[in-house]
Image (cartoon, rainbow, N blue to C red):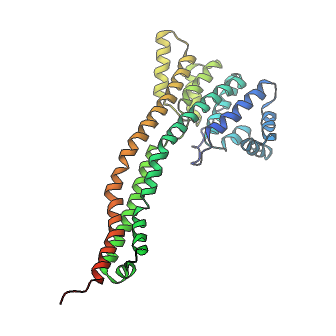
Amino acid sequence: MVIRRRPAPPASETGASDAATSVQTLAVLLQAGAVPVVAWRHLADIGDPHALAVTERVEGGIPLLDAIEAEGGAWVDLAAAWEIATTVGAPLAEVLRIIAESLRDAASAADDVRIALAEPAGTARLLLWMPLAGLLLGFALGFDTVGVIVGNPLGAACVVAGLLLVLAARLWTRRLLRRAAPEPGTPGMRAELVAVALAGGASIDRALRLVAESSAGGGTEEGIRSVLELSRAAGVPAVELLRASAAQDRHAARVHGRLRAAKLSTRLLIPLGVCTLPAFLLLGVAPMLLSVLASTPLPL
């Protein structure tokens, strides 16, 4: 069987924690003697939405591996592990148990990062409404801000400039949040898949080739080769070293994610000071001042 290179998963990735639970159940069913397609049908019978989608595709004539991969996200890693295990003859149930544990660990790390990001992200989104709240405050206090905006070129210019600053703050904040979000893919998955291939009896070159031809993410070939070189030099089984390296990758992803979340709180102050606060002055304060000046009679 030839491993096909597949496209990257879609942006709307499925949760790794949901996939881990399903994969663990599949491993139990396979170990109990169920054939793969029947195992998926049993999983679909208990209401698993992903299993339902996979079985519908299989019944429609799509190969099982393609049907799994079509779910996207963590299921792409499962499809790669499934195909490599069947190619090299590794025990599929045991492989699925390992993959389920990896997905669960990766999901836990990603959840930690999202929780750490939740507070600064929520604060940033709330502050983005401050300039518009200032504009509404002028209406509520009875200032003729509408007349200033419509009839005074300076007032209209303040509103336009304020809205542009609000837009810039939103785009800037969104970019900072996107850069701080957890990276897609399962950290260490490529090392796990190389370990699967080696455990099934494949040579190192073949194992690396099979993983390179799959679409699984998480890890680099350079890192895997360094682990394999350490295994050769120290005389330590490569499979255990690769799995330890994969676990370390997941731990590093958790730590780096928390650090990004901590730095985000400081970096969000930049668009706040550069864009949001000036926008508040232009949209909230300036129209009120112009309204006061317009209603004040000039001295004779």
Residue 67 appears left or right of 42: left
Query: Which residue is found at the position 59% from the left and 34% from the top?
Result: 214
Residue 225 visible? The answer is: yes
Rendered view: 142 above or below 7: below
Rendered view: 286 above or below 43: below
Instruction: Report x, y in % for residue 212.
Output: 55, 32
Quarter of the image with the N terminus in it: top right
Residue 183 visible? The answer is: no
Closest to the observer, 89 or 73: 73
Closest to the observer, 146 or 248: 146
Instruction: Report x, y in % for residue 71.
Output: 66, 44
Rendered view: 298 above or below 240: below
Quarter of the image with the C terminus in it: bottom left
Query: Which residue is found at the position 77% from the left and 32% from the top?
Result: 36
Q: Residue furthest bottom?
A: 300
Closest to the observer, 157 or 139: 139
Residue 263 appears left or right of 228: left
